[in-house]
Image (spheres, coloured by chain):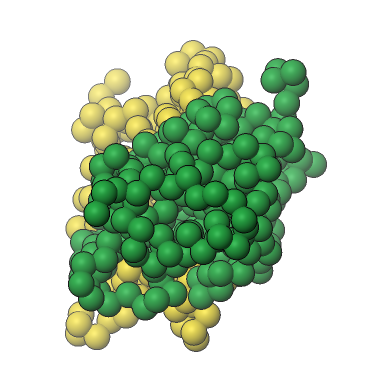
Chain colours: A yellow, B green
């Protein structure tokens, strides 16, 4: 009965991890309010993917929050820089760095204090919905270089959140739920596959075209392909013609 | 020498508390980057006041971040409600609830998880500026009803912030600075007065007109007037004709 399901906020990027997180939240019986961010991504394909995933997985609402961080100064946020390999692997289940490989230089849409800002909006949304559960698809296995994907960051955010709002203090504590935290990419894919996630709707590629079709060559595509192979699940990713 | 002053982020609403906080940060030797939020306030007077204060107190930059929380759903954010007395006294030095008294009902622009969201953006801005000090004019003396104005919330945010970013982990810890935390309104006014704050530029009134002139009658005006009286400082507030 949808009307008796407790609400939850689920951060949703349109990538593989956050889609799986949404499926898990729904499987646990939550009425899911998906939250995405428009922070000046290179193209809209991530947000289109998020909308398709939200619909496909029965989210009761999909909110896109506009945050224009260019006000902080352009050069630090979008710059031609050399990005180390580990940076290219960032796909934390929340909307984030949008990367495009061009020879050796990469224009990167960088979100400073990314998961802090995204979780803060999720906390505000949770306060409006009067709900206690916030889901985020962070993962400490493949992406340990990012401090704001680690369990101790999540724990500290939860502690702070429970001092921030009156409802939390009055006996409805906030829980930051990270069901993917200790899973490998293959584990994530197996879990999502068993829950009916249509991974064809998700976009991981840094060079996806305007139809969301992947290049099949970038580091993100290779990581994703390896995940499907290791999971023993057919890869439904739409690749563009070469 | 401005070029050798370390940068700091200062949350600035255009009210009395945040103006004083900015003056203190500058007095401590910081190159101040003021940060305000446009969250659909009833009128622009708060942001105009913030801009005037930033200029008057020598901020090196004033950034207005647009956050449109109406995406979370209108009724929870702007509603005709009865607001308890203590709610009317909210002036925490960061941009926030915008109130207007109309008989007994008050349309309130409510910002859920307010200081968490504002401080998260400040943390992102600090990451861009590579600075460690974030100033916010919260006060635990007059406004203890708000959980996100208390010292333990600020401490928890600081702990979280120092797990959130690489620079914090690598030996440049973030400090959330709350110089007004334990001051009375009179103490705040005395401190700002000694530092040359032009309080005529600041707006506290919930019913300020488009020129920023105060009503002189609402709870916020009365609290402010009492502060000037207790401080023994002439009240420079511009009141509109009755």
Q: How many marks?
A: 0
Placement of A51 over or under A131, stated as above or below: above
Whether residue A156 sits left or right of residue B225 in the image: it is right
Classify residue B123 by image quadrant.
top right
- Quarter of the figure with the N terminus of chain B: top right
* Image point (60%, 62%), residue name: B230
A201 or B203: nearer the eye? B203
Q: Which of the two residues, B168 or B110, is positioned nearer the viewer here?
A: B110
> A233 left or right of B140?
left
Residue closest to the eye, A169 or B42 = B42
* Residue B236 position (above or below residue B107): above
Residue A234 makes an appearance in the image = no
Residue A92 image position (x, y, % from top left): 49, 49
| Percent coordinates x, y for residue A158 in the rendering | 56, 67
Q: Is residue B48 left or right of residue A229?
A: left
Q: Position of residue A72 (x, y in %)?
A: 48, 31
Q: Position of residue A139 (x, y in %)?
A: 55, 55
Q: Is residue B217 among the parts visible in the rendering?
A: yes
Residue occupying the point 49% across, 13% down:
A103
Locate residue B175 relative to residue B228 in the image: left or right. Answer: right
Q: Is residue A137 above or below residue A163?
A: above
The quadrant of the image that shows the C terminus of chain B is bottom left
Q: Is residue B93 above or below residue A25?
A: above
Residue at left 32%, top 75%?
B83
- Name the foreground residue: B54 vs B233: B233
């Amino acid at each position: 009965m949808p009307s008796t399901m407790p609400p939850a906020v689920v951060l949703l990027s349109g990538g593989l991890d956050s889609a799986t997180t949404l499926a898990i939240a729904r499987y646990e019986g939550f009425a899911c309010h998906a939250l995405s961010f428009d922070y000046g991504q290179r193209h809209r394909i991530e947000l289109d993917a998020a909308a398709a995933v939200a619909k496909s997985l029965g989210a009761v609402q999909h909110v896109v929050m506009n945050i224009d961080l260019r006000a902080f100064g352009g050069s630090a946020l979008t710059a031609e820089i050399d990005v180390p390999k580990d940076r290219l692997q960032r796909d934390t289940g929340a909307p984030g760095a949008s990367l495009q490989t061009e020879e050796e230089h990469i224009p990167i849409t960088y979100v400073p204090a990314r998961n802090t800002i995204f979780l803060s909006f999720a906390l505000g949304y949770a306060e409006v919905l009067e709900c206690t559960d916030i889901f985020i698809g962070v993962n400490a296995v493949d992406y340990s270089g990012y401090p704001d994907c680690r369990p101790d960051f999540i724990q500290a955010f939860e502690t702070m959140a429970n001092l921030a709002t009156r409802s939390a203090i009055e006996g409805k504590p906030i829980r930051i739920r990270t069901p993917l935290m200790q899973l490998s990419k293959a584990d994530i894919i197996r879990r999502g596959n068993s829950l009916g996630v249509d991974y064809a709707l998700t976009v991981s590629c840094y060079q996806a075209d305007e139809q969301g079709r992947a290049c099949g060559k970038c580091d993100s595509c290779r990581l994703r392909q390896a995940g499907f192979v290791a999971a023993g699940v057919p890869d439904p990713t739409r690749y563009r013609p070469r």
